Amino acid sequence: MKIGIFGLGYVGVVNAACFTKLGHYVIGCDVKETKVDMLRKGKSPIYEPKVDELLMEALQSGQLSATTSVSEVINNAEVLLICVGTPSNSNGEVNLDFIYNTSFEIAKEIKSLGKEITILYRSTIPPNTLKTYIEPIFKTILKDEISLVALAFYPEFLREGKAVDDFFNAPRIVLGSDSDQLDKAKNLLAYNPEIPFYHTNPQTSEFVKYVDNTFHALKVAFVNEVYEVAKSFDVDVSTANEIFLNDRSLNISTAYLKPGLPFGGSCLPKDLRAIVAMAKSQNLKLPLLESISESNAHAMNRLEQLILKQNKSKIFFVGFTFKNYTDDYRESPILTIIERLIKSNYDVKFTDVDANLVNLRIDKPSLIKYYQESITEGIKCSDLIVVSKRYLVDVVKLNHDKKLIINCSRRTIEDNSIIHLF
Ligand SMILES: NC(=O)c1ccc[n+]([C@@H]2O[C@H](COP(=O)([O-])OP(=O)(O)OC[C@H]3O[C@@H](n4cnc5c(N)ncnc54)[C@H](O)[C@@H]3O)[C@@H](O)[C@H]2O)c1
């Protein structure tokens, strides 16, 4: 395939090198002459292992060229990769000026040539940028010829320093587009059948990149904070870290990473308070660890607000322990909300197949009168049902009057009467 690449920085050059390795022809384009000149000589304008060799091979086989002329690219390419910068403005928002300029110039050339072209944006852009910012640029210029372009977002996940290997063994490839002309894009991206491929809507594909980088930043800050505490207690940091990393079923895994209820139970809140107290005792200021409980409290408030917003007074909670398959209700977010609502005079009932009523009677004697053994009865006498555990399907089956349900469990089911927490 003939690929035009706009922006010859880290992303553009790595993509140029890797797509030529796959046998494609690449024409690179940048506003900076010096970068274009270097690429013309098969040299990389940035340092990245393996890229120089790949570019030189591509040059010698006639698969690589470069230009500053947009029309030369549009004339010669069937697919474009847009890899221009998207730096921060002083208020933290993303500056889309380079995206605008590139898109505008490309749209004008497509209009004058009347050529069909697939355009894949690789620059990191906020959700809905493709739909509400980029597409209108093309619509304004192409008008009723808008079907000449197939627009998509194709997030780049490379790590500098390992970018070439990351390209060929990407953990996943994501294509975000509502276009029905994606054959070229899909062919281009199907270069390794082992790599999971996701086709989703543009805004989802745009957002996943921010999730990744926010999580990476959180992890770096997190390990630096926890081991700062460790150092103060003469812990062997490298052994402690090796032990932490070795647990691939809970620590380094998908565990605790699905959005849902705030955390609760008898360990996480207590141990978090303990490590924050340890840090304080050593005069360590650890903003990340200190803010975790606050973040969780906000999540709890958001859930309470979601319930209150429905303006229903008879509320039935299905599940009140802190997670599935346990009778432990210590620091259960749902039980905390139940107690708050009872205090505010709501007509609350709750149930749970895992409940240990003997314990509840002893620990929280005033709550037991709100306990409702039968789910059917509870549903009948309520006008809002909050499901926090695995019984969503049962509740839906029993909810003959189609009362409003708030689903805080991680099960999903199509039903118009359900409001999902996530
Ligand atoms: N660097 C990374 O590791 C990485 C990883 C994933 C995603 N990204 C994202 O990819 C995008 C590019 O990142 P980068 O690090 O390669 O940026 P970069 O600043 O190294 O390169 C961007 C290039 O675009 C060129 N450019 C600007 N306007 C142009 C135009 N109108 N026509 C042609 N070229 C133009 C610039 O001259 C520059 O050479 C950013 O949105 C970034 O967030 C970067």
Image (spheres, grey):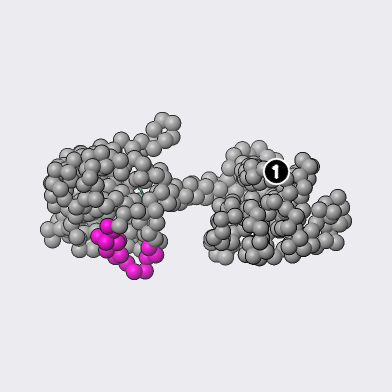
Instruction: Specify whether 418 is left or right of 42.
Output: right
Q: Residues within 10 Å of mark 1 (few under 14, many from 20)?
A: some
Q: Where residue 47 sits: x, y (%)?
A: 28, 49
Residue depicted at x 66% and y 61%: 400
Instruction: Determine if the magenta segment contains residue 89.
Output: no
Residue depicted at x 29% and y 50%: 151
Q: Which residues are magenta?
A: 181-197
Above or below, 323 relative to 107? below
Residue depicted at x 74% and y 65%: 353
Q: Is mark 1 within 8 Å of ligand 1?
A: no
Viewer-proximal residue among 253 and 4: 4
Quarter holding the N terminus is: bottom left
For this orientation, the residue located farthest to the top is 90
Viewer-proximal residue among 28 and 300: 300
Kindly indicate the quadrant of the structure image that contains residue 392.
bottom right
Q: Where residue 202 sits: x, y (%)?
A: 38, 50
Instruction: Determine if the magenta segment contains residue 189.
Output: yes
Q: Secondary structure at mark 1?
A: helix
Residue 243 visible within the image: no
Above or below, 34 relative to 404? above
For this orientation, the residue located farthest to the bottom is 193
Q: Amino acid at mark 1?
A: Ala
Viewer-proximal residue among 146 and 19: 146
Quadrant for ligand 1 reads top left
Q: Where residue 115 sits: x, y (%)?
A: 16, 50
Instruction: Specify whether 45 is left or right of 155.
Output: left
Instruction: Specify whether 394 is left or right of 381.
Output: left
Mark 1 sits on what residue?
A: 277
Kindly indicate the quadrant of the structure image that contains residue 170.
bottom left
Residue 186 visible within the image: yes
